[in-house]
Image (spheres, grey):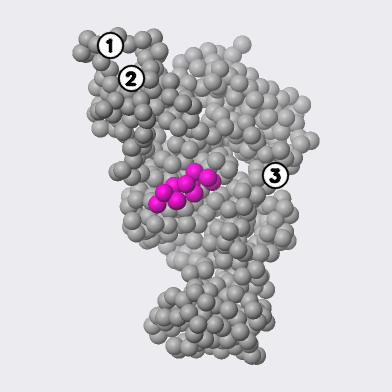
Amino acid sequence: MAAPLTYKLLPHPSPSSLLSDSHLSLCSGASLRTRSLQRDGLHRPSALESSFVAELQASSVRSAQSKQPELIPISPDDRPVSDRLTEDGYLSAEQLLSLRNARGLWNKPTFQRKTKIVCTIGPSSCSKEMIWKLAEAGMNVARLNMSHGDHNSHKKVIDLVKEFNATSPDNVIAIMLDTKGPEVRSGDLPRPIKLIKGQEFTFTIKRGVGTESSVSVNYDDFVNDVESGDTLLVDGGMMSLLVKSKTADSVLCEVVDGGELKSRRHLNVRGKSATLPSITEKDWEDIKFGVENEVDFYAVSFVKDAQVVHELKDYLKSCQADIHVIVKIESADSIVNLQSIIDASDGAMVARGDLGAELPIEEVPLLQEEIIRMCRGAGKAVIVATNMLESMINHPTPTRAEVSDIAIAVREGADAIMLSGETAHGKYPLKAVKVMHTVALRTEATVSEVNAPENLGYAFKRHMSEMFAYHATMMSNTLGTAVLVFTRSGFMAMLLSHYRPTGTVFAFTNEVKVQRRLALYHGVRPIITTFLDDGEKTFCEALSFLQKRGLLKEGEEITLVQSGQTPIWRSESTHLIQVRRAGERGK
Protein backbone atom coordinates (compact mmCIF):
# COMPACT_ATOMS: atom_id res chain seq x y z
CA MET A 1 0.00 0.00 0.00
CA ALA A 2 1.59 3.25 -1.08
CA ALA A 3 1.98 6.09 1.43
CA PRO A 4 -0.87 8.63 1.14
CA LEU A 5 -0.10 11.82 -0.74
CA THR A 6 -0.44 15.07 1.18
CA TYR A 7 -0.45 18.65 0.00
CA LYS A 8 0.47 21.95 1.61
CA LEU A 9 -2.37 24.35 2.32
CA LEU A 10 -2.23 27.98 1.24
CA PRO A 11 -0.43 29.85 4.04
CA HIS A 12 -2.50 33.03 4.27
CA PRO A 13 -6.09 32.07 5.31
CA SER A 14 -6.78 29.96 8.39
CA PRO A 15 -6.64 26.17 7.95
CA SER A 16 -10.34 25.84 8.78
CA SER A 17 -11.40 28.32 6.12
CA LEU A 18 -9.15 26.65 3.61
CA LEU A 19 -10.64 23.26 4.24
CA SER A 20 -14.19 24.54 4.17
CA ASP A 21 -13.59 25.93 0.69
CA SER A 22 -11.40 23.02 -0.33
CA HIS A 23 -8.65 25.42 -1.39
CA LEU A 24 -5.27 23.79 -1.74
CA SER A 25 -1.94 24.73 -3.21
CA LEU A 26 0.02 22.30 -5.28
CA CYS A 27 3.07 24.34 -6.20
CA SER A 28 5.43 26.64 -4.38
CA GLY A 29 3.99 29.50 -6.37
CA ALA A 30 0.54 28.73 -4.92
CA SER A 31 -1.05 29.06 -8.34
CA LEU A 32 -2.68 25.67 -8.93
CA ARG A 33 -5.68 25.35 -6.59
CA THR A 34 -9.01 23.65 -6.22
CA ARG A 35 -12.28 25.27 -5.28
CA SER A 36 -15.43 23.59 -4.13
CA LEU A 37 -18.54 24.43 -6.09
CA GLN A 38 -20.74 23.05 -3.36
CA ARG A 39 -21.64 26.48 -1.98
CA ASP A 40 -23.02 27.41 -5.43
CA GLY A 41 -25.15 24.30 -5.54
CA LEU A 42 -23.35 23.12 -8.66
CA HIS A 43 -21.27 20.30 -7.28
CA ARG A 44 -21.59 17.52 -4.72
CA PRO A 45 -18.19 16.24 -3.48
CA SER A 46 -17.43 12.75 -4.70
CA ALA A 47 -16.05 10.04 -2.43
CA LEU A 48 -12.66 10.66 -4.00
CA GLU A 49 -12.77 14.37 -3.20
CA SER A 50 -14.05 13.79 0.33
CA SER A 51 -11.20 11.39 1.00
CA PHE A 52 -8.78 13.85 -0.53
CA VAL A 53 -9.93 16.72 1.73
CA ALA A 54 -9.86 14.46 4.81
CA GLU A 55 -6.25 13.60 4.09
CA LEU A 56 -5.50 17.30 3.68
CA GLN A 57 -7.01 18.04 7.07
CA ALA A 58 -4.87 15.36 8.69
CA SER A 59 -1.81 16.69 6.90
CA SER A 60 -2.43 20.25 8.06
CA VAL A 61 -2.70 19.10 11.68
CA ARG A 62 0.52 17.07 11.41
CA SER A 63 2.40 19.93 9.77
CA ALA A 64 1.26 22.38 12.43
CA GLN A 65 2.27 20.08 15.29
CA SER A 66 5.73 19.27 13.95
CA LYS A 67 6.54 22.89 12.94
CA GLN A 68 7.85 22.00 9.52
CA PRO A 69 10.01 24.52 7.61
CA GLU A 70 8.14 26.88 5.32
CA LEU A 71 7.65 26.23 1.62
CA ILE A 72 7.99 29.47 -0.33
CA PRO A 73 7.41 30.66 -3.89
CA ILE A 74 10.81 30.66 -5.58
CA SER A 75 9.82 33.08 -8.32
CA PRO A 76 6.86 35.47 -8.48
CA ASP A 77 6.40 34.30 -12.07
CA ASP A 78 6.03 30.62 -11.15
CA ARG A 79 2.77 29.31 -12.64
CA PRO A 80 2.30 25.73 -13.83
CA VAL A 81 0.73 25.26 -17.22
CA SER A 82 -2.05 22.74 -17.73
CA ASP A 83 -4.70 22.53 -20.38
CA ARG A 84 -7.07 21.35 -17.65
CA LEU A 85 -7.01 24.65 -15.76
CA THR A 86 -10.16 26.72 -15.98
CA GLU A 87 -10.00 30.36 -16.99
CA ASP A 88 -9.59 31.60 -13.40
CA GLY A 89 -6.90 29.03 -12.57
CA TYR A 90 -8.97 26.56 -10.54
CA LEU A 91 -9.23 22.80 -10.78
CA SER A 92 -11.52 20.29 -9.10
CA ALA A 93 -9.95 17.70 -6.81
CA GLU A 94 -11.07 14.91 -9.16
CA GLN A 95 -9.33 16.58 -12.12
CA LEU A 96 -6.30 17.23 -9.95
CA LEU A 97 -5.84 13.59 -9.02
CA SER A 98 -6.19 12.51 -12.64
CA LEU A 99 -3.26 14.63 -13.78
CA ARG A 100 -0.37 12.83 -15.43
CA ASN A 101 1.90 11.05 -12.96
CA ALA A 102 0.00 11.44 -9.70
CA ARG A 103 3.23 10.92 -7.74
CA GLY A 104 5.14 13.23 -10.02
CA LEU A 105 5.03 16.80 -11.20
CA TRP A 106 2.46 18.25 -8.81
CA ASN A 107 2.84 15.84 -5.93
CA LYS A 108 3.88 17.00 -2.48
CA PRO A 109 5.82 14.69 -0.18
CA THR A 110 4.22 13.79 3.12
CA PHE A 111 5.88 16.84 4.74
CA GLN A 112 9.35 15.62 5.76
CA ARG A 113 12.35 16.74 3.72
CA LYS A 114 14.98 14.00 3.63
CA THR A 115 17.95 15.71 1.96
CA LYS A 116 19.76 17.69 4.65
CA ILE A 117 20.96 21.31 4.40
CA VAL A 118 24.42 22.48 5.51
CA CYS A 119 24.73 26.23 6.16
CA THR A 120 28.02 28.10 6.47
CA ILE A 121 27.83 30.54 9.38
CA GLY A 122 29.44 33.95 8.91
CA PRO A 123 28.79 37.68 9.39
CA SER A 124 25.31 37.43 7.84
CA SER A 125 24.20 34.56 10.05
CA CYS A 126 26.19 34.46 13.30
CA SER A 127 23.63 36.18 15.55
CA LYS A 128 21.40 34.19 17.87
CA GLU A 129 18.29 35.44 16.09
CA MET A 130 19.53 34.36 12.65
CA ILE A 131 20.81 30.96 13.78
CA TRP A 132 17.37 30.28 15.31
CA LYS A 133 15.65 31.37 12.10
CA LEU A 134 17.95 29.26 9.90
CA ALA A 135 17.32 26.22 12.10
CA GLU A 136 13.56 26.69 11.89
CA ALA A 137 13.79 27.26 8.12
CA GLY A 138 15.54 23.93 7.55
CA MET A 139 19.24 24.11 8.47
CA ASN A 140 20.50 20.71 9.68
CA VAL A 141 24.25 21.32 9.94
CA ALA A 142 26.10 24.52 10.86
CA ARG A 143 29.47 24.78 9.07
CA LEU A 144 32.38 26.76 10.51
CA ASN A 145 34.80 27.84 7.77
CA MET A 146 38.20 28.08 9.45
CA SER A 147 39.56 30.08 6.51
CA HIS A 148 37.75 33.04 8.06
CA GLY A 149 37.18 34.31 11.58
CA ASP A 150 39.01 33.32 14.76
CA HIS A 151 38.47 30.81 17.53
CA ASN A 152 36.55 33.30 19.66
CA SER A 153 34.00 34.03 16.94
CA HIS A 154 33.59 30.34 16.12
CA LYS A 155 33.20 29.49 19.82
CA LYS A 156 30.26 31.91 20.05
CA VAL A 157 28.56 30.16 17.13
CA ILE A 158 29.13 26.72 18.67
CA ASP A 159 27.61 27.89 21.96
CA LEU A 160 24.57 29.36 20.17
CA VAL A 161 23.97 26.15 18.21
CA LYS A 162 24.19 24.06 21.37
CA GLU A 163 21.82 26.48 23.09
CA PHE A 164 19.31 25.95 20.29
CA ASN A 165 19.73 22.17 20.47
CA ALA A 166 18.90 22.22 24.18
CA THR A 167 15.45 23.64 23.36
CA SER A 168 14.29 20.85 21.04
CA PRO A 169 14.28 17.05 21.47
CA ASP A 170 13.76 16.32 17.76
CA ASN A 171 15.23 19.20 15.74
CA VAL A 172 18.96 19.46 16.39
CA ILE A 173 21.79 21.07 14.45
CA ALA A 174 25.13 19.31 13.95
CA ILE A 175 28.38 21.30 13.92
CA MET A 176 30.95 20.86 11.14
CA LEU A 177 34.43 22.37 11.33
CA ASP A 178 35.90 22.91 7.86
CA THR A 179 39.70 23.19 7.83
CA LYS A 180 41.46 25.81 5.72
CA GLY A 181 43.93 23.35 4.20
CA PRO A 182 47.09 24.04 2.19
CA GLU A 183 45.98 26.94 0.03
CA VAL A 184 48.27 28.59 -2.51
CA ARG A 185 47.47 32.30 -2.67
CA SER A 186 48.78 35.43 -4.29
CA GLY A 187 50.25 38.17 -2.10
CA ASP A 188 49.12 41.66 -1.23
CA LEU A 189 48.55 44.37 -3.81
CA PRO A 190 48.34 48.13 -3.16
CA ARG A 191 45.16 48.15 -5.27
CA PRO A 192 43.38 45.72 -7.64
CA ILE A 193 45.13 45.12 -10.98
CA LYS A 194 43.30 44.82 -14.28
CA LEU A 195 44.66 41.83 -16.20
CA ILE A 196 44.12 42.13 -19.96
CA LYS A 197 44.16 39.25 -22.45
CA GLY A 198 47.60 38.89 -24.04
CA GLN A 199 49.60 40.85 -21.46
CA GLU A 200 52.51 39.29 -19.57
CA PHE A 201 52.34 38.92 -15.80
CA THR A 202 54.80 37.43 -13.29
CA PHE A 203 54.25 35.37 -10.14
CA THR A 204 57.27 35.28 -7.79
CA ILE A 205 58.17 33.58 -4.53
CA LYS A 206 60.00 36.75 -3.45
CA ARG A 207 58.13 38.38 -0.60
CA GLY A 208 56.86 41.92 -0.96
CA VAL A 209 53.95 44.03 -2.14
CA GLY A 210 52.95 43.43 -5.74
CA THR A 211 53.17 45.81 -8.68
CA GLU A 212 51.26 46.34 -11.92
CA SER A 213 53.23 43.51 -13.55
CA SER A 214 53.94 41.02 -10.74
CA VAL A 215 52.69 39.60 -7.46
CA SER A 216 54.19 37.32 -4.81
CA VAL A 217 53.00 33.77 -3.98
CA ASN A 218 52.88 32.32 -0.44
CA TYR A 219 54.24 28.90 -1.51
CA ASP A 220 58.02 28.44 -1.81
CA ASP A 221 57.81 25.40 -4.13
CA PHE A 222 55.46 27.15 -6.55
CA VAL A 223 58.16 27.48 -9.23
CA ASN A 224 59.04 23.79 -8.94
CA ASP A 225 55.42 22.68 -9.29
CA VAL A 226 54.69 24.42 -12.60
CA GLU A 227 56.03 23.87 -16.10
CA SER A 228 55.87 25.79 -19.36
CA GLY A 229 52.49 25.20 -20.99
CA ASP A 230 50.62 24.78 -17.69
CA THR A 231 47.40 26.71 -17.15
CA LEU A 232 47.30 28.80 -13.99
CA LEU A 233 43.82 29.56 -12.64
CA VAL A 234 43.15 32.53 -10.38
CA ASP A 235 40.25 32.81 -7.94
CA GLY A 236 38.68 29.46 -8.80
CA GLY A 237 38.99 29.97 -12.56
CA MET A 238 37.67 33.52 -12.81
CA MET A 239 40.95 34.35 -14.58
CA SER A 240 43.45 32.09 -16.37
CA LEU A 241 47.05 32.50 -17.47
CA LEU A 242 49.39 30.36 -19.60
CA VAL A 243 52.85 29.64 -18.17
CA LYS A 244 55.47 30.82 -20.71
CA SER A 245 58.75 30.37 -18.83
CA LYS A 246 60.26 30.35 -15.36
CA THR A 247 63.44 31.25 -13.48
CA ALA A 248 64.73 30.15 -10.09
CA ASP A 249 62.22 32.35 -8.27
CA SER A 250 59.61 33.54 -10.80
CA VAL A 251 57.05 32.29 -13.31
CA LEU A 252 56.27 34.38 -16.40
CA CYS A 253 52.70 34.01 -17.71
CA GLU A 254 50.51 35.32 -20.50
CA VAL A 255 46.95 36.32 -19.63
CA VAL A 256 44.38 34.14 -21.43
CA ASP A 257 41.19 35.20 -19.63
CA GLY A 258 41.53 38.56 -17.95
CA GLY A 259 39.83 40.16 -15.00
CA GLU A 260 40.47 42.11 -11.82
CA LEU A 261 43.21 40.63 -9.62
CA LYS A 262 42.87 41.47 -5.93
CA SER A 263 45.04 40.62 -2.93
CA ARG A 264 45.32 37.06 -1.61
CA ARG A 265 43.53 35.27 -4.44
CA HIS A 266 43.45 31.47 -4.61
CA LEU A 267 45.78 29.92 -7.23
CA ASN A 268 45.47 26.50 -8.93
CA VAL A 269 47.47 24.77 -11.63
CA ARG A 270 45.10 22.86 -13.93
CA GLY A 271 45.58 19.11 -13.46
CA LYS A 272 48.14 19.40 -10.64
CA SER A 273 48.08 19.55 -6.85
CA ALA A 274 50.54 21.49 -4.72
CA THR A 275 53.11 19.38 -2.86
CA LEU A 276 51.87 20.66 0.49
CA PRO A 277 50.72 18.62 3.51
CA SER A 278 46.94 18.18 3.56
CA ILE A 279 46.80 19.18 7.23
CA THR A 280 48.83 22.31 7.99
CA GLU A 281 49.97 23.65 11.37
CA LYS A 282 46.99 25.99 11.43
CA ASP A 283 44.69 23.07 10.67
CA TRP A 284 46.04 21.12 13.64
CA GLU A 285 45.35 24.10 15.91
CA ASP A 286 41.81 24.27 14.54
CA ILE A 287 41.35 20.52 14.97
CA LYS A 288 42.39 20.80 18.63
CA PHE A 289 39.88 23.63 19.00
CA GLY A 290 37.21 21.32 17.57
CA VAL A 291 38.09 18.57 20.05
CA GLU A 292 37.86 21.00 22.97
CA ASN A 293 34.45 22.23 21.83
CA GLU A 294 33.05 18.82 20.83
CA VAL A 295 32.16 19.49 17.21
CA ASP A 296 30.50 16.65 15.31
CA PHE A 297 32.35 16.60 11.98
CA TYR A 298 35.64 17.70 10.47
CA ALA A 299 35.59 18.56 6.78
CA VAL A 300 39.23 18.12 5.77
CA SER A 301 40.39 20.16 2.78
CA PHE A 302 42.54 18.91 -0.11
CA VAL A 303 42.78 15.27 1.01
CA LYS A 304 45.24 13.55 -1.34
CA ASP A 305 45.25 10.00 0.01
CA ALA A 306 43.86 7.74 2.72
CA GLN A 307 46.94 8.20 4.91
CA VAL A 308 45.80 11.72 5.79
CA VAL A 309 42.49 10.33 7.08
CA HIS A 310 44.19 7.59 9.09
CA GLU A 311 46.55 10.14 10.64
CA LEU A 312 43.67 12.35 11.76
CA LYS A 313 41.60 9.43 13.06
CA ASP A 314 44.58 8.15 15.08
CA TYR A 315 44.92 11.59 16.64
CA LEU A 316 41.21 11.74 17.49
CA LYS A 317 41.39 8.27 19.00
CA SER A 318 44.29 9.36 21.21
CA CYS A 319 42.13 12.28 22.39
CA GLN A 320 39.12 9.98 22.90
CA ALA A 321 37.21 12.35 20.62
CA ASP A 322 34.19 10.89 18.82
CA ILE A 323 34.27 13.16 15.76
CA HIS A 324 33.58 11.91 12.23
CA VAL A 325 35.83 12.83 9.32
CA ILE A 326 34.38 14.15 6.05
CA VAL A 327 36.93 14.30 3.22
CA LYS A 328 36.68 17.15 0.72
CA ILE A 329 37.22 15.90 -2.81
CA GLU A 330 38.71 18.94 -4.52
CA SER A 331 42.05 18.04 -6.10
CA ALA A 332 43.45 15.95 -8.94
CA ASP A 333 45.25 13.69 -6.44
CA SER A 334 42.02 12.95 -4.56
CA ILE A 335 40.40 11.64 -7.76
CA VAL A 336 43.28 9.23 -8.36
CA ASN A 337 42.91 7.79 -4.84
CA LEU A 338 39.14 8.25 -4.57
CA GLN A 339 38.04 4.75 -3.49
CA SER A 340 40.65 4.37 -0.74
CA ILE A 341 39.96 7.90 0.55
CA ILE A 342 36.21 7.26 0.78
CA ASP A 343 36.73 3.87 2.45
CA ALA A 344 38.96 5.46 5.11
CA SER A 345 36.57 8.33 5.85
CA ASP A 346 33.11 8.70 7.37
CA GLY A 347 31.84 10.63 4.36
CA ALA A 348 32.80 12.93 1.50
CA MET A 349 32.09 16.42 0.26
CA VAL A 350 32.05 17.17 -3.46
CA ALA A 351 33.85 20.54 -3.26
CA ARG A 352 33.13 21.63 -6.81
CA GLY A 353 34.95 24.97 -6.68
CA ASP A 354 38.55 23.80 -6.46
CA LEU A 355 37.68 20.53 -8.19
CA GLY A 356 36.56 22.50 -11.23
CA ALA A 357 39.74 24.56 -11.10
CA GLU A 358 42.18 21.65 -10.97
CA LEU A 359 40.27 19.51 -13.48
CA PRO A 360 38.34 20.39 -16.66
CA ILE A 361 35.11 21.99 -15.50
CA GLU A 362 32.98 19.84 -17.82
CA GLU A 363 34.09 16.76 -15.87
CA VAL A 364 32.73 18.02 -12.54
CA PRO A 365 29.10 16.86 -13.08
CA LEU A 366 30.32 13.36 -13.97
CA LEU A 367 32.62 13.27 -10.96
CA GLN A 368 29.81 14.47 -8.71
CA GLU A 369 27.58 11.61 -9.83
CA GLU A 370 30.39 9.06 -9.42
CA ILE A 371 31.38 10.29 -5.94
CA ILE A 372 27.75 10.11 -4.79
CA ARG A 373 27.46 6.58 -6.18
CA MET A 374 30.67 5.45 -4.47
CA CYS A 375 29.70 6.95 -1.12
CA ARG A 376 26.27 5.35 -1.19
CA GLY A 377 27.81 2.00 -2.04
CA ALA A 378 30.29 2.32 0.82
CA GLY A 379 27.63 3.40 3.31
CA LYS A 380 29.14 6.87 3.74
CA ALA A 381 27.47 10.27 3.88
CA VAL A 382 27.98 12.57 0.88
CA ILE A 383 27.56 16.35 0.61
CA VAL A 384 27.36 18.39 -2.60
CA ALA A 385 28.81 21.87 -2.17
CA THR A 386 29.80 25.14 -3.88
CA ASN A 387 27.80 27.63 -5.98
CA MET A 388 24.44 25.98 -5.38
CA LEU A 389 22.65 29.32 -4.95
CA GLU A 390 25.55 31.66 -5.70
CA SER A 391 23.37 34.36 -7.26
CA MET A 392 21.44 34.68 -3.98
CA ILE A 393 24.48 36.23 -2.34
CA ASN A 394 23.32 39.45 -3.99
CA HIS A 395 19.87 38.71 -5.43
CA PRO A 396 16.65 37.50 -3.75
CA THR A 397 15.73 35.04 -6.51
CA PRO A 398 17.85 32.11 -7.76
CA THR A 399 18.57 31.37 -11.39
CA ARG A 400 16.78 28.48 -13.09
CA ALA A 401 20.14 26.76 -13.51
CA GLU A 402 20.75 26.89 -9.74
CA VAL A 403 17.35 25.36 -9.02
CA SER A 404 18.14 22.58 -11.50
CA ASP A 405 21.54 22.08 -9.85
CA ILE A 406 19.92 21.48 -6.46
CA ALA A 407 17.35 19.13 -7.99
CA ILE A 408 20.08 17.08 -9.72
CA ALA A 409 22.02 16.65 -6.47
CA VAL A 410 18.84 15.50 -4.72
CA ARG A 411 17.94 13.08 -7.51
CA GLU A 412 21.46 11.65 -7.56
CA GLY A 413 21.08 10.74 -3.89
CA ALA A 414 23.19 13.22 -1.94
CA ASP A 415 22.73 13.09 1.83
CA ALA A 416 23.14 16.85 2.07
CA ILE A 417 23.47 20.00 -0.02
CA MET A 418 25.50 22.96 1.17
CA LEU A 419 25.29 26.74 1.20
CA SER A 420 28.55 28.71 1.54
CA GLY A 421 28.68 32.44 0.85
CA GLU A 422 24.89 32.46 0.48
CA THR A 423 24.45 32.17 4.26
CA ALA A 424 27.90 33.30 5.43
CA HIS A 425 27.99 36.80 3.94
CA GLY A 426 25.07 37.00 1.51
CA LYS A 427 22.23 39.50 1.63
CA TYR A 428 19.49 36.85 1.83
CA PRO A 429 20.70 33.99 4.08
CA LEU A 430 17.27 33.04 5.38
CA LYS A 431 15.59 33.06 1.98
CA ALA A 432 18.44 30.99 0.51
CA VAL A 433 17.71 28.24 3.05
CA LYS A 434 13.98 28.43 2.36
CA VAL A 435 14.59 28.17 -1.39
CA MET A 436 16.89 25.17 -0.94
CA HIS A 437 14.34 23.49 1.34
CA THR A 438 11.52 24.11 -1.14
CA VAL A 439 13.43 22.82 -4.16
CA ALA A 440 14.68 19.72 -2.32
CA LEU A 441 11.23 18.89 -0.97
CA ARG A 442 9.55 19.31 -4.35
CA THR A 443 12.23 17.20 -6.06
CA GLU A 444 12.01 14.39 -3.51
CA ALA A 445 8.32 14.02 -4.37
CA THR A 446 9.30 12.63 -7.77
CA VAL A 447 12.31 10.55 -6.75
CA SER A 448 12.00 6.78 -6.60
CA GLU A 449 14.52 4.93 -4.44
CA VAL A 450 13.95 1.68 -6.34
CA ASN A 451 17.02 2.20 -8.53
CA ALA A 452 19.67 2.01 -5.82
CA PRO A 453 23.38 1.67 -6.74
CA GLU A 454 24.36 -1.88 -7.63
CA ASN A 455 27.12 -1.87 -5.01
CA LEU A 456 24.86 -0.60 -2.20
CA GLY A 457 25.80 -2.31 1.03
CA TYR A 458 29.08 -3.92 -0.02
CA ALA A 459 30.89 -2.35 2.95
CA PHE A 460 28.82 -4.36 5.46
CA LYS A 461 27.79 -7.32 3.33
CA ARG A 462 28.75 -9.85 6.01
CA HIS A 463 27.13 -7.92 8.83
CA MET A 464 23.80 -9.10 10.25
CA SER A 465 22.58 -5.52 10.60
CA GLU A 466 23.04 -4.94 6.87
CA MET A 467 20.54 -7.68 6.08
CA PHE A 468 18.06 -6.29 8.58
CA ALA A 469 18.43 -2.75 7.24
CA TYR A 470 17.71 -4.06 3.76
CA HIS A 471 14.62 -6.06 4.78
CA ALA A 472 13.30 -3.29 7.05
CA THR A 473 13.54 -0.93 4.09
CA MET A 474 11.69 -3.36 1.84
CA MET A 475 8.98 -3.78 4.47
CA SER A 476 8.68 -0.03 4.97
CA ASN A 477 8.41 0.58 1.24
CA THR A 478 5.86 -2.19 0.72
CA LEU A 479 3.60 -1.15 3.61
CA GLY A 480 4.14 2.58 3.20
CA THR A 481 5.36 3.07 6.77
CA ALA A 482 8.01 5.10 8.53
CA VAL A 483 10.82 3.27 10.34
CA LEU A 484 11.50 3.40 14.08
CA VAL A 485 14.94 2.42 15.35
CA PHE A 486 16.61 2.67 18.76
CA THR A 487 20.36 3.22 18.64
CA ARG A 488 23.25 4.01 20.97
CA SER A 489 25.93 4.41 18.31
CA GLY A 490 23.83 5.54 15.34
CA PHE A 491 25.07 2.60 13.25
CA MET A 492 21.69 1.05 12.41
CA ALA A 493 20.15 4.43 11.59
CA MET A 494 23.01 5.13 9.17
CA LEU A 495 22.53 1.77 7.46
CA LEU A 496 18.82 2.45 7.05
CA SER A 497 19.59 5.91 5.68
CA HIS A 498 21.79 4.53 2.92
CA TYR A 499 19.03 2.16 1.78
CA ARG A 500 16.76 5.21 1.44
CA PRO A 501 13.40 3.90 2.71
CA THR A 502 10.50 5.97 1.39
CA GLY A 503 9.36 6.70 4.96
CA THR A 504 11.22 8.79 7.52
CA VAL A 505 13.70 6.98 9.79
CA PHE A 506 12.90 8.04 13.36
CA ALA A 507 16.12 7.30 15.26
CA PHE A 508 15.73 7.39 19.04
CA THR A 509 19.02 7.59 20.93
CA ASN A 510 20.12 8.27 24.49
CA GLU A 511 23.36 9.93 23.33
CA VAL A 512 23.29 13.66 22.52
CA LYS A 513 26.43 13.29 20.41
CA VAL A 514 24.83 10.56 18.29
CA GLN A 515 21.65 12.61 17.88
CA ARG A 516 23.60 15.57 16.48
CA ARG A 517 25.67 13.38 14.17
CA LEU A 518 22.59 11.73 12.66
CA ALA A 519 21.31 15.18 11.66
CA LEU A 520 23.52 14.91 8.55
CA TYR A 521 22.09 11.63 7.26
CA HIS A 522 19.44 11.43 4.54
CA GLY A 523 15.93 10.75 5.79
CA VAL A 524 16.91 10.37 9.46
CA ARG A 525 15.10 12.34 12.15
CA PRO A 526 17.16 11.88 15.32
CA ILE A 527 15.33 12.15 18.64
CA ILE A 528 16.87 12.18 22.12
CA THR A 529 15.24 9.90 24.68
CA THR A 530 15.93 7.85 27.79
CA PHE A 531 16.18 4.08 27.41
CA LEU A 532 14.14 2.47 30.17
CA ASP A 533 14.86 -0.98 31.56
CA ASP A 534 11.56 -2.15 30.09
CA GLY A 535 11.95 -2.26 26.30
CA GLU A 536 8.20 -2.47 25.63
CA LYS A 537 7.54 0.62 27.72
CA THR A 538 10.24 2.49 25.79
CA PHE A 539 8.62 1.47 22.49
CA CYS A 540 5.22 2.74 23.63
CA GLU A 541 6.63 6.03 24.88
CA ALA A 542 8.42 6.55 21.56
CA LEU A 543 5.18 5.94 19.64
CA SER A 544 3.34 8.30 21.98
CA PHE A 545 5.99 10.99 21.43
CA LEU A 546 5.64 10.72 17.65
CA GLN A 547 1.87 11.02 17.95
CA LYS A 548 2.08 14.10 20.17
CA ARG A 549 4.46 15.77 17.70
CA GLY A 550 2.09 15.04 14.84
CA LEU A 551 4.57 12.69 13.19
CA LEU A 552 2.41 9.58 13.54
CA LYS A 553 -1.37 9.20 13.54
CA GLU A 554 -3.45 7.04 15.87
CA GLY A 555 -3.64 3.55 14.38
CA GLU A 556 -0.94 4.23 11.80
CA GLU A 557 1.57 1.44 11.22
CA ILE A 558 5.32 1.84 11.65
CA THR A 559 8.20 -0.59 11.07
CA LEU A 560 10.30 -1.12 14.20
CA VAL A 561 13.85 -2.47 13.88
CA GLN A 562 16.02 -3.97 16.62
CA SER A 563 19.52 -4.67 15.40
CA GLY A 564 22.89 -2.92 15.26
CA GLN A 565 26.28 -3.22 16.89
CA THR A 566 25.16 -2.59 20.48
CA PRO A 567 22.17 -4.68 21.66
CA ILE A 568 19.33 -2.89 23.45
CA TRP A 569 16.78 -5.14 25.26
CA ARG A 570 17.99 -8.15 23.28
CA SER A 571 20.78 -10.70 23.21
CA GLU A 572 23.72 -10.47 20.81
CA SER A 573 22.17 -13.12 18.56
CA THR A 574 18.64 -11.68 18.44
CA HIS A 575 17.61 -9.28 15.67
CA LEU A 576 14.01 -8.27 15.12
CA ILE A 577 11.72 -6.43 12.68
CA GLN A 578 8.18 -5.66 13.84
CA VAL A 579 5.24 -3.76 12.41
CA ARG A 580 3.64 -1.81 15.26
CA ARG A 581 0.47 0.25 15.27
CA ALA A 582 0.36 3.59 17.06
CA GLY A 583 -1.86 3.46 20.12
CA GLU A 584 -1.59 -0.31 20.55
CA ARG A 585 0.73 -2.10 22.95
CA GLY A 586 2.86 -4.95 21.62
CA LYS A 587 1.96 -8.47 22.60
Q: CA distance from mark 2 to mark 1?
A: 10 Å
Is the residue under label 3 in contact with that under label 1 (CB below 8 Å)? Answer: no
Is the residue under label 1 in contact with that under label 2 (CB below 8 Å)? Answer: yes
Local packing at callout 2 (Cα closer than 10 Å; few below 14, some 14-19, many 20+) is many
Give me the residue at 47% from left, 41% from top.
440
Q: What label sits on residue 181 in the rendered view?
A: none
Q: Which residue has dot 1 on it?
A: 43
Q: Is residue 287 left or right of residue 468?
A: left
Q: CA distance from mark 1 to mark 3?
A: 55 Å
Q: Is residue 248 visible?
A: yes
Q: Quadrant of residue 335?
A: bottom right
Label tally: 3
Q: Is residue 460 left or right of residue 126?
A: right
Q: Is residue 19 visible?
A: no
Q: Which residue has dot 3 on it?
A: 378
Q: Position of residue 85 (x, y in %)?
A: 32, 27
Which callout, 1 or 3, points to the residue nearer the camera?
1
Give me the residue at 52% from left, 25% from top.
542
Label 2 sits on a secondary structure element that is: loop
Q: Is residue 555 magenta?
A: no
Question: Which mark is first along the chain, 3 or 2?
Answer: 2
Q: Measured along the vertical axis of the image, is residue 61 above or below residue 144? A: above
Q: Position of residue 183 (x, y in %)?
A: 57, 71
Magenta segment, which residues?
399-409
Disc 3 marks a residue whose amino acid type is Ala
Disc 1 marks a residue whose amino acid type is His
Q: Which residue has dot 2 on it?
A: 92
Question: Which mark is first along the chain, 1 or 2?
Answer: 1
**Quadrant of the frame with the C terminus:** top right
